[in-house]
């Protein structure tokens, strides 16, 4: 029996409807999916909506990366490319250096690499910085004490 993958768009719809109090049966009927597919989507995260990764508007888009690739192939300078797409020359320079050279830069590869780098797990500052942990702990204790006086 083959399974049809559930799209990110459908997952978001399931979570939005579930959050608004719709039954799993109603959600399944709306999406024309099986009850078990919708239920498993919800159960897989313990009933808590997962974080769906979205790119910041500050990051280069695939269109901008394609434009960089095209203009590099035409032999334009970094400054001219930056002016053409409305970005800083340093942004263009970092993008090219991060993902190859002027001769080897490819938009699709650069976009995939950027997506992977964005997903990297970052350690919590409180777990790695003892001094910061102590300061935060002391301030929270003071806050609790001052609130108990109210």
Image: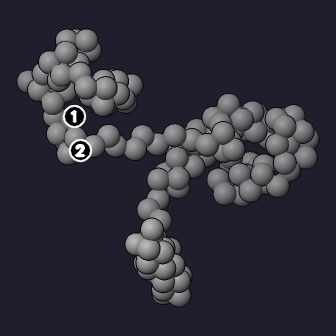
Q: CA distance from mark 1 to mark 2?
A: 7 Å
Residue 142, relative to residue 87: is it above or below?
below
Identify the residue shown where x is 84% and y is 37%: 86
Dot 1 corresponds to which residue?
41
Describe residue 105's horizontal placement relative to residue 121 as left or right: right
Dot 2 corresponds to which residue?
45
Describe residue 83's horizontal placement relative to residue 69 as left or right: right
Badge 2 crowding class, 10 Å Cα cut-off, few under 14, some 14 to 19, many 20 or more, is few
The answer to whether one can see residue 30 in this image is yes
Q: Position of residue 48 (x, y in %)?
A: 27, 43
Q: Position of residue 100 (x, y in %)?
A: 67, 54
The residue sitting at the left extreme is 1
Asked if the residues shown at circle 1 and circle 2 are in contact, with their CB atoms under 8 angstroms apart, the answer is yes
Q: Quadrant of the C terminus?
A: bottom left
Q: Element under label 2?
A: loop
Residue 16, relative to residue 138: is it above or below?
above
Q: Nearer the viewer, residue 135 or 37?
A: 135
Q: Quadrant of the N terminus?
A: top left
Q: Nearer the viewer, residue 26 or 116?
A: 26
* Displayed quadrant of residue 13: top left
Identify the residue shown where x is 78% and y is 49%: 92
The answer to whether one can see residue 2 in this image is no
Describe residue 8's horizontal placement relative to residue 61 as left or right: left
Q: Nearer the viewer, residue 96 or 28?
A: 28
Residue 55, relative to residue 20: is it above or below?
below
Describe residue 23's horizontal placement relative to residue 1 as left or right: right
């Amino acid at each position: 029996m083959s399974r049809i993958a559930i799209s990110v768009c459908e997952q978001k719809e399931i979570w939005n409807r579930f959050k608004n109090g719709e039954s799993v049966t109603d959600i399944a009927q709306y999406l024309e999916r099986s009850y078990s597919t919708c239920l498993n989507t919800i159960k897989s995260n313990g009933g808590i909506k997962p974080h769906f990764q979205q790119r910041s508007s500050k990051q280069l888009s695939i269109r901008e990366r394609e434009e960089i690739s095209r203009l590099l192939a035409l032999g334009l300078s970094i400054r001219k490319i930056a002016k053409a797409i409305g970005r800083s020359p340093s942004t263009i320079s970092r993008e090219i250096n991060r993902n190859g050279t002027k001769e080897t830069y490819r938009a699709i590869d650069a976009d995939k690499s950027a997506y992977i780098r964005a997903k990297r797990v970052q350690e919590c500052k409180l777990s790695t910085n003892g001094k910061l942990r102590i300061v935060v702990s002391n301030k929270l204790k003071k806050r609790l004490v001052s609130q108990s006086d109210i």
